[in-house]
Amino acid sequence: MSLRVGVVGVGWGALVHVPAFRLVDGFEVIALCGRTPARLDRASAATGITDVGMDWADFVRRDDLDVISIATPVALHHPVGLAALAAGKHVVVEKPVALHAVEAYELAQAVAAAGTRAIACFELRWTPERALVRSLVARGAVGTPYSVRVHESLPHWHPARPNQALWMYDLTTGGGYLNGVAAHDIDFVCSLFGRPVQVCADVRTSLPTRPLPDGGELSVTADDTSAVLIRLDSGALAVVTTSAMGLHTVGASFDVFGSAGTLTGSIGSRANAASLGLGTVNDSGLVDVPVEVRPLASGRPVPERGAAPLIRAMALMLEDWLVELTGGVAEHPLPTLEDGSVVQAVIEAARSSAAGAGWVDVPGPSGVVA
């Protein structure tokens, strides 16, 4: 019998969450919940799901739902997640897990109290190239890490580009690219190479305003560009840089230098193919490592749209999560809500550092500095 899923949030929820669940045998999305009738109607028409509601507090308590997938605006992740866990549901929380690290940690504590399961949507761990990096690191290909770097570039906030959804420009609603993109890279680095101990960063808003169609201006409070240095408890130094001001660029590059070798290359994007080179102490140089695509167990085709890589990655994450939900042990580490709180703690430390605090200690999930 399939686990019955209700999705709260019908923007990203309808675009990515619903099709990802539909690619995995063992889940059935039966209901949607949204805040505005027009968007809910559009999502219902697009997905074919006619069981819809607008009151998330009632929705998460429905007896006919086993899993609540949360793709709401960021400020609602915390209250919706707490309510769903209190109702005894398994929970999927879109990243960022919450506006603040303390809220994310409260969600993680609520999972333990509820006795159910929850994951954070760091689905990029399951893209082919990042999965390959994880496998090579686990096999000891780079040994003890010394230096790690991830750089992500996108064009979305360049002045030549049209506006994104306006909430993206507002820091108080969870906007900006530390939350929107760097969160994935911080999770990737910390889940592979060590817990963050200290952070030093510069975080910038390159253009303070955006033009509006009516001739007015929108004040921009969220970040488009950041450089974050992270001291890890493994002894490695990680550098995560992100910019949404790179006209004609979409991509992510990656390096890790370690005692046993170097792993470097592209770790994928929606626009270009990934490639990785590995050179160990026994090699004379870098050797190309083929990137293999893990097939979906269901064999179903991924919907052809711009978000297809993210849908596929989320479906693979859900496949592994289903193993745990049905009493097994997943082969690949699943991103927890505690992981989400660690990422938010790094982001908060980065913003504090950029405001003049210099190197900032990163507390553990309980608030204690490591």
Image (cartoon, rainbow, N blue to C red):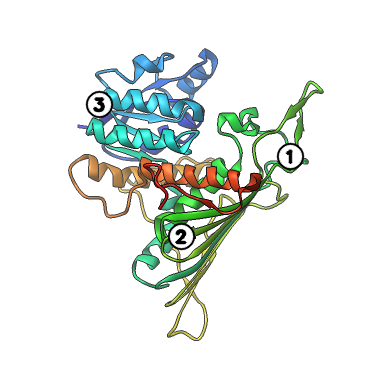
Few, some or many C-alpha atoms within 10 Å of disc 3 (few <14, some 14-19, many ≥20)?
Answer: many
Q: Quarter holding the N terminus?
A: top left
Q: Position of residue 174 (x, y in %)?
A: 55, 33
- Of mark 2 and mark 3, the one earlier in the sequence is 3
Q: Amino acid at mark 1?
A: Arg
Q: Position of residue 7 (x, y in %)?
A: 39, 26
Q: Which mark is residue 232?
A: 2
| Residue 112 on image: x %, y % | 26, 36
Eye-nearest disc, 1 or 2: 2
Tell which circle, 3 or 1, labels the residue nearer the N-terminal end: 3
> How far apart are labels 3 and 1 at the CA level?
44 Å
Which residue in the structure is indicated by mark 1?
161
Quickly name the residue at label 3: 88
Q: Nearer the viewer, residue 274 or 158?
A: 158
Of callouts 1 and 2, which one flags the residue occurring earlier in the amino acid sequence?
1
Give how far across and how far down residue 241 sits, in percent. Answer: 61, 55
> Image point 27% across, 28% down: which residue?
89
Apparent side of residue 58 relative to residue 155 in the rendered image (left or right): left
Q: In the rendered structure, are the residues bearing label 3 and label 1 in contact, judged by CB atoms less than 8 Å apart?
A: no
Determine the CA span between mark 1 and mark 2: 36 Å
